[in-house]
């Protein structure tokens, strides 16, 4: 039961089982959830930072349990880390609209795939911490770019 619950959270309720680019599927799910929360619950950028912080502990646990159960260091079907990173990236938006969502999505995926320092180094942390920490840093990088771009009204 513990492993099943961990897998459910780690795969972000099945998004990680997407046949192509599961990380992108997890990021897209995070964007869709964010758009609903902004529109119907009035969420702001700070709410997404809070959500990411609240999800971090359970995500580390779920990622670690799932990785150990499957005997894979960083399974591609574990995508809760993408959700956290994507929500951190969204916190860089000064206002929410479709171009901002698209920019946050593209920038987070870019930094998550490219892994500039220290993103790659954080990936080396043990277990679920390493699985999640690199995506958090990729989200921070994306948020910083979005804040700067927003200052110059580039989107």
Image (cartoon, rainbow, N blue to C red):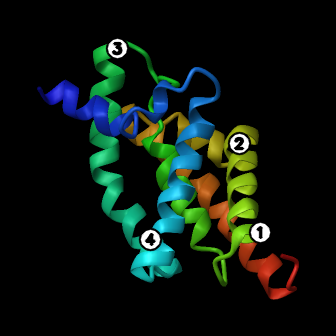
Between marks 1 and 4, how big is the CA–CA gap? Answer: 17 Å
**What secondary structure is marked by label 1?**
helix
Q: Residues within 10 Å of mark 4 (few under 14, many from 20)?
A: some
Q: Which residue is mark 3?
A: 70
Checking the image for residue 37, the label placed there is 4
Q: Residue at x 80, y 87 (%)?
A: 151
Mark nearer the N terminus (3 vs 4) = 4
Between marks 4 and 2, how big is the CA–CA gap? Answer: 29 Å
Question: Farthest residue in the left direction?
Answer: 1
Between marks 1 and 2, how big is the CA–CA gap? Answer: 24 Å
Residue 85 in percent (x, y) is at 54, 54
Q: Which residue is mark 1?
A: 99
Q: Residue at x 63, y 39 (%)?
A: 24
Q: Residue at x 57, y 47 (%)?
A: 27
**What secondary structure is marked by label 4?**
helix
Q: Is residue 134 visible?
A: no
Q: Which residue is mark 2?
A: 115
């Amino acid at each position: 039961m513990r492993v099943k619950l961990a897998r459910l959270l780690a795969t972000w309720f099945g998004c990680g089982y997407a046949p192509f680019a599961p990380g992108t599927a997890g990021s897209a799910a995070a964007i869709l959830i964010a758009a609903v929360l902004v529109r119907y619950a009035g969420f702001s950028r700070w709410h997404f930072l809070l959500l990411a912080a609240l999800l971090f502990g359970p995500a580390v646990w779920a990622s670690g349990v799932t990785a150990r159960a499957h005997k894979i260091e960083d399974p591609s079907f574990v995508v809760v880390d993408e959700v956290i990173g994507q929500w951190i990236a969204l916190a860089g938006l000064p206002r929410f609209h479709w171009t901002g969502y698209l920019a946050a999505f593209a920038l987070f995926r870019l930094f998550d795939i490219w892994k500039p320092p220290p993103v790659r180094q954080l990936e080396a942390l043990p277990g679920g911490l390493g699985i999640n920490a690199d995506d958090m840093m990729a989200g921070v990088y994306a948020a910083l770019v979005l804040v700067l771009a927003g200052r110059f009204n580039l989107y």
